Amino acid sequence: MIRHALLKTTATALALAGAGLLGLAQPAAAQEVEACLITKTDINPFFVKMREGAAAKAQELGVRLSTYAGRVDGDHETQVQAVESCIASGAKGILITASDTKAIVPVVRQARDAGILVIALDTPLEPIDAADATFATDNFKAGELIGQWAAATLGEEAANARIALLDLSPSQPSVDVLRNQGFLTGFGIDTKDINRIGDEDDPRIVGNDVTSGNEEGGRRAMENLLQRDPDINVVYTINEPSAAGAYETLNAFGKTDGVLIVSVDGGCPGVQNVSEGIIGATSQQYPLLMASLGIEAIARFAETGELPEPTPGLDFFDTGVTLITDNPAEGVESIDSEKGLELCWG
């Protein structure tokens, strides 16, 4: 019972974990309930897996699912149109990974005023309570883990690091800020304003550039930063596609030796790149779980009016994060790429 609309793609139904996952009880069948999933793009493997998770759970629960996506990462206007379409269609719930976490708030408010449950997936809105709930990786922790790993791997040489920061977007959506600032905190760098990228004055930072979360953006940003400082030896990347692009540029310039690349995602191509030594460490997150839990929450809300609860002590529901590396660092918990490939997506 899956209906696709606007910039939609076909969602593939996969077998998912059973009811009661992470303590969320299985709702009764939710006939005639409509839900919407709005992602940043429909090509990034992370969002493809999210769509698959939502589709499978919707099919299981009898929820009618409409899926929407921006043309590219950062396509805010298409996401606004998608929310408006969901309001007009009478959806009971919207799951959204917002491209612009501030600018999307007014139309989200319209949806909530219409009685629609709005759940942010992966990327918290700003403010976070602009949505009814957020199901996400602890993105600050994800960044912190790879920062801790990089610092521990370098040891005393961390004091002399030359760091390139490959971020997502000039608008600095919350996921961008959380991962970047988490990485710097884990590495031991004063972030100044924890809510803003780029105001740090630590001399080890060569600079920031944006990638749009894709390989081409990673190649371009890495080239720009290498022109500032050819001795970069630590590269933080917002996600694994941008990490792959950064590696291509480093390789083209003959600069791969002695450079640590770290990232966040945990998709199968990214974990394979850990196995091959392209990425030193990545923080693995679980998009299929985020989306399937979101559909469960919408079905339950439609039946009982119950709102999702956050993880105790947090302002969102934490769907987990794990560091993947084949070069473990003392004091930083991790699993190897072989285990990571068993858990990966995409």
Image (spheres, grey):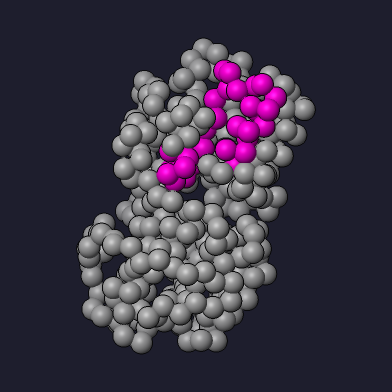
* In the depicted structure, whether residue 241 falls above or below residue 18: above
**Residue nearest the observer in this picture, 56 or 197:** 56
Question: Which residue in the rendered view is the most extreme toward the right?
Answer: 227
In magenta, the rendered stretch is 242-271
* In the depicted structure, whether residue 114 falls above or below residue 43: below
Residue 124 visible: no
Residue under the image location 59 percent in, 80 percent down: 84
Residue 227 sits in quarter: top right
Image location of residue 283, percent across then percent down: 44, 39
**Residue nearest the observer in this picture, 326 or 298:** 326
Q: Is residue 112 left or right of residue 298?
A: right
Residue under the image location 40 percent in, 66 percent down: 12
* In the depicted structure, whether residue 311 falls above or below residue 194: below
Q: Is residue 322 magenta?
A: no
Residue under the image location 44 percent in, 68 percent down: 11
Residue 250 sits in quarter: top right
